[in-house]
Image: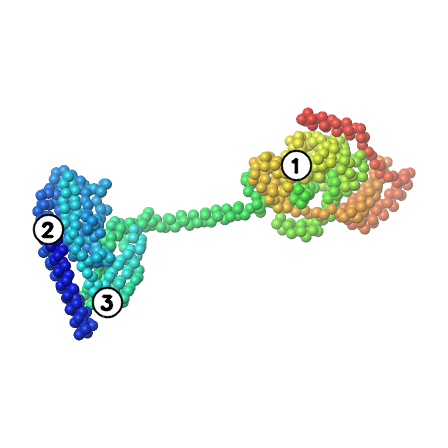
């Protein structure tokens, strides 16, 4: 090896002198001639180097051949690898290993460091196990190898071995790689598969050509797929290129659908003319092709089509899901709805409450469910009074008599039709029009004495509302009056009825609680009413700012609960404990006019949110002046009615009187006081004449009072029942 290295130095010195002489001659010749001379001299020097290298290495090769021949039971072909190569060039070789024994042998191999950067093995078609492969008896294994010199490799002579190990023996295969300097006229060709790994409609290859020549060239590019075993050309395509200094493009190499998947060699040959000669430069890279799974066929169609259909359905389903998710996310209320368990269909026995909150679905309510009592609660401004008055409107439309005990005169608006533009704005959402606004027939009676006795049976007229305005009473007086109304119902001698006949509405009922100034008397009486009124077809509607303080029989005997927006800590905790966090959040976030409703008959007993229908009557109470005027007319009308009743008791025909009284009532309810005056004028004149002709004079309406001692006894009995748990 030492003598070889010395000889190479001499050769390099000779080459250097030749190059110096050639460069000197360039001064005396034209550029084209100098270039041709340099090329020729360069080629000659490389041929000399190849020849000398071969002569120097021959003794070493022969010596190794003699040593390796001793392993006659394994034959190697070829017995050595010897290549002269330029930087960027690529060669493919097949090594054949034949087992001449009658038993299998396991073979491993190792490439020495000097030549390992040039040698690579393709083991894709050979079964390997922990770096070893097996050769069966009398079998020949083909071991494909690639020899490539990168452009960065320093030109030199590289010598090494491939050591094969089997049966505790070693076969040393010489490897001699002589990397020469690049030729001046060598165009560099680089192929880089872009979509390597799958067979689609075609293969895209990034092409790069570097032209160091002083002129541009027209060239042919031949791209081929070669078999890794036999190097057979399986598929070729040709392209025309015009190459200047640099060329880069993506070329399409069409691969038939029927082409088998596997590992191939992608070979590129660029053929171009230069100085009267045809020169070729090569680029070779391994290529692994798989049939893209979606290009496979099922029932004659590519899987792409099925995937497209599934994706289409998926996108539609996903779009629906995202839409619903987005819509749900924007909602204030997230309570579960069991639509089949909700009264969404209109029936004769039902009234239209409004809409399911944040939907366009109408929600109805069975009138007879009001007989099992209703409580409506919420903070001021939350819409509890509107919700309660809406329920009463529906009851009146179903010809149910309604009696209201009103501490604030808020319910006097029933006697005027709605003219509020704010309320009108909600009409279209519920299918209403301005023409649907209306007032309701009935009477306003102002209570000035808490012990005043009233004939409730007389005021439970079908389809009419009687408002007992308690705004003239002190809080404790209201407590006493409410207690007395319950006692009086028990004394009315009402007939039992399985259907709803009347509603009794107690507004601001929380005022009966001791914490709000009440004595508790009215509270225990209402508890008694909740327990027993239903047998007479009387339903209670209780309206309160709070619910948490209502205990005992009131809660136990109320089936319908409506909770509007509230800030009361007790009620919020009650909602959390009874219904859970989601219901609590829904109530806290509820918009005005929306409230939680719960009735065991609906939504599987779970709470749901209702957007209550706007009112048809005026949401505002009568002005104080109008109320006083109305009360004056109402008192005069009551006096006329009382005297007509006295005449009727005497056997006088009062049909005409009753007809005019009815008309006067209607005009009074609508606030047509001028028309009422006209009716009164005629009624008073004829009434006085008839009374006089029957030896009677006009009488004042007597005001009866209840016995306070009897009321106390009644309250005490109610308290005992309460304390004993009903």
Residue furthest to the top: 724
In percent of the image, x 13 and y 60: which residue is there? 10
Q: Which element carries disc 3, helix, strand or loop?
A: loop
Dots 3, 2 in contact, CB < 8 A: no
Q: Answer with mark 3 or mark 2, whichever residue precedes in sequence.
A: 2
Confirm whether residue 237 shows in the render: no
Indicate the position of residue 184 as horizontal and vertical percent values: 20, 65
Dots 1, 3 in contact, CB < 8 A: no
Q: Residues within 10 Å of mark 3 (few under 14, many from 20)?
A: some
Foreground mark, 3 or 2, reads 2
In percent of the image, x 29 and y 57: which residue is there? 205
Q: Answer with mark 2 or mark 1, whichever residue precedes in sequence.
A: 2
In front of the other: 628 or 430: 628
From the viewer's perspective, is 429 left or right of 477?
left
Task: Please identify the quarter of the rendering in which residue 492 is found.
Answer: top right
Q: Which residue is mark 3?
A: 213
In front of the other: 533 or 222: 222
In percent of the image, x 73 and y 48: which residue is there? 416
User: Marks 3 and 2, how far apart in space?
Assistant: 40 Å
User: Marks 2 and 1, how far apart in space?
Assistant: 108 Å
Q: Which element carries disc 1, helix, strand or loop?
A: loop
Say which mark, if any, is on residue 60: 2
Q: Residues within 10 Å of mark 2 (few under 14, many from 20)?
A: few
Q: Which residue is mark 1?
A: 547
Q: Residues within 10 Å of mark 1 (few under 14, many from 20)?
A: many
Indicate the position of residue 488 as horizontal and vertical percent values: 76, 32
Foreground mark, 1 or 3, reads 3
Q: Answer with mark 1 or mark 3, whichever residue precedes in sequence.
A: 3
**Where is the C terminus found, in terms of image quarters?**
top right
Task: Please identify the quarter of the rendering in which residue 164 is found.
Answer: top left
């Amino acid at each position: 090896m030492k003598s070889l290295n010395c000889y190479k130095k001499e050769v390099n010195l000779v080459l250097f002198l030749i190059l110096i002489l050639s460069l000197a001659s360039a001064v005396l010749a034209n550029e084209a001639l100098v270039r041709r001379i340099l090329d020729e001299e360069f080629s000659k020097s490389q041929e000399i180097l190849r020849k000398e290298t071969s002569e120097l290495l021959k003794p070493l090769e022969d010596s190794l051949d003699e040593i390796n021949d001793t392993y006659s039971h394994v034959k190697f072909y070829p017995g050595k690898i010897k290549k002269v190569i330029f930087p960027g060039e690529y060669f493919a070789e097949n090594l054949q290993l034949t087992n001449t024994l009658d038993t299998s042998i396991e073979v491993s191999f190792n490439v020495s460091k000097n030549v390992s950067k040039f040698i690579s093995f393709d083991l894709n078609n050979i079964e390997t196990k922990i770096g070893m492969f097996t050769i069966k008896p009398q079998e020949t294994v083909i071991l494909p190898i690639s020899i490539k010199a990168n452009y960065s490799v320093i030109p030199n002579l590289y010598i090494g071995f491939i050591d094969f190990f089997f049966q505790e023996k070693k076969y040393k295969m010489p490897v001699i790689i002589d990397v020469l300097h690049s030729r001046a006229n060598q165009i560099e060709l680089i192929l880089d598969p872009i979509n390597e790994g799958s067979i689609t409609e075609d293969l895209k290859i990034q092409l790069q050509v570097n032209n160091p020549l002083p002129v541009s060239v027209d060239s042919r590019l031949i791209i081929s797929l070669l078999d890794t075993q036999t190097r057979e050309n399986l598929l070729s395509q040709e392209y025309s290129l015009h190459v200047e200094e640099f060329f880069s493009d993506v070329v399409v190499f069409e691969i038939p659908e029927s082409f088998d998947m596997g590992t191939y060699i992608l070979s590129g040959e660029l053929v171009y003319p230069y100085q009267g000669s045809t020169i070729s430069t090569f680029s070779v890279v391994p290529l692994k092709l798989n049939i893209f799974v979606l290009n496979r066929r099922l029932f004659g169609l590519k899987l792409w089509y099925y995937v497209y259909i599934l994706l289409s359905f998926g996108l539609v389903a996903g779009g629906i899901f995202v839409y619903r998710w987005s819509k749900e996310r924007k909602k204030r209320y997230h309570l579960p709805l069991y639509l089949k368990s909700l009264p969404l269909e209109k029936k004769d026995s039902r009234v239209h409450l409004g809409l399911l909150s944040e939907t366009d679905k109408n929600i109805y309510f069975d009138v007879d469910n009001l007989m099992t009592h209703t409580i409506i609660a919420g903070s001021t401004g939350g819409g509890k009074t509107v919700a309660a008055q809406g329920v009463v409107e529906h009851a009146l439309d179903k010809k149910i008599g309604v009696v209201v005990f009103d501490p604030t005169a808020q319910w006097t608006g029933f006697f005027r039709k709605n003219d509020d533009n704010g309320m009108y704005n909600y009409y279209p959402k519920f299918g209403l029009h301005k023409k649907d606004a209306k007032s309701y027939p009935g009477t306003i009676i102002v209570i000035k004495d808490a012990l005043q006795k009233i004939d409730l049976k007389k005021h439970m007229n079908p389809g009419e509302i009687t408002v007992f305005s308690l705004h003239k009473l002190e809080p404790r007086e209201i407590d006493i009056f409410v207690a007395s109304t319950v006692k009086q119902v028990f004394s009315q001698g009402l007939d039992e009825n399985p259907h709803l006949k009347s509603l009794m509405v107690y507004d601001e009922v929380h005022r009966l609680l001791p914490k709000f100034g009440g004595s508790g008397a009215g509270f225990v009486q209402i508890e008694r009413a909740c327990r027993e009124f239903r047998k007479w077809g009387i339903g209670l509607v209780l309206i309160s700012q709070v619910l948490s303080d209502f205990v005992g029989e009131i809660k136990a005997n109320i089936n319908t609960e409506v909770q509007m927006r509230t800030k009361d800590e007790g009620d919020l905790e009650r909602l959390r404990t009874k219904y859970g966090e989601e219901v609590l959040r829904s109530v806290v976030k509820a918009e005005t006019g929306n409230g939680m409703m719960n009735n065991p008959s609906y939504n599987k007993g779970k709470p749901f949110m209702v957007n209550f229908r706007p009112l048809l009557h005026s949401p505002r109470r009568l002005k104080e002046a109008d109320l006083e005027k109305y009360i004056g007319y109402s008192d005069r009308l009551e006096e006329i009615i009382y005297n007509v009743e006295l005449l009727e008791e005497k056997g006088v025909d009062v049909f005409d009187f009753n007809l005019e009284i009815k008309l006067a009532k209607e005009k009074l309810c609508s606030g047509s006081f001028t028309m009422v005056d006209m009716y009164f004028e005629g009624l008073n004149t004829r009434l006085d004449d008839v009374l006089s002709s029957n030896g009677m004079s006009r009488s004042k309406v007597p005001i009866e009072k209840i016995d306070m001692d009897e009321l106390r006894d009644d309250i005490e009995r109610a308290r005992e029942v309460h304390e004993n748990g009903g």
